[in-house]
Amino acid sequence: MPPIRLAFTEIFEECPDSVPVVTTELVAEGGKTRMSATARYESQAVRDMVLKTGMEKGAAVSYDRLEDLVATLRA
């Protein structure tokens, strides 16, 4: 499978004036797929404000659910 790259913008209610660009890449490695996601904010201050919202916990739950979904599709 060739690498897949998806880029999009998102808006957080806590920071409606900031529109980060999120890039997600999927790369096949040894029979598995590695996913990486990078969010680029306009400044470190905005990034830090977003991190203080606890968004990483929600993202972790979403990625865990995605992993579960993929596992059911492979079964």
Image (spheres, rainbow, N blue to C red):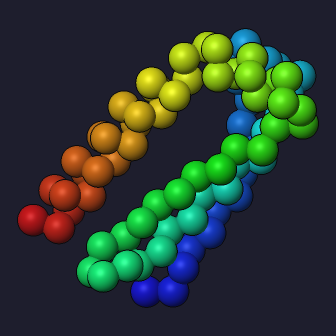
Residue 11 horizontal/vertical position (percent): 74, 29
Quadrant occupied by the N terminus: bottom left
Residue 4 or residue 38, whichever sits in front? 38
Determine the residue located farthest toward the left in the rendered image: 75
- Indicate left or right for 27 with 42 as reference: left
Q: Residue at x 82, y 24 (%)?
A: 46
- Indicate left or right for 37 with 64 as reference: right
Q: Is residue 42 above or below residue 67?
A: above
Residue 18 horizontal/vertical position (percent): 85, 28
Q: Residue at x 30, y 82 (%)?
A: 30
Residue 73 or residue 59, whichever sits in front? 59
Q: Classify residue 19 by image quadrant.
A: top right
- Indicate left or right for 1 with 38 as reference: left
Determine the residue located farthest toward the bottom in the rendered image: 1
Q: Classify residue 7 by image quadrant.
A: bottom right
Q: Classify residue 16 by image quadrant.
A: top right
Q: Residue at x 46, y 25 (%)?
A: 58
Q: Residue at x 9, y 65 (%)?
A: 75
Q: Is residue 64 above or below residue 23?
A: above
**Count of marks overlaid on the render:** 0
Residue 47 horizontal/vertical position (percent): 76, 28
Q: Is residue 51 above or below residue 10?
A: above
- Indicate left or right for 72 with 41 as reference: left
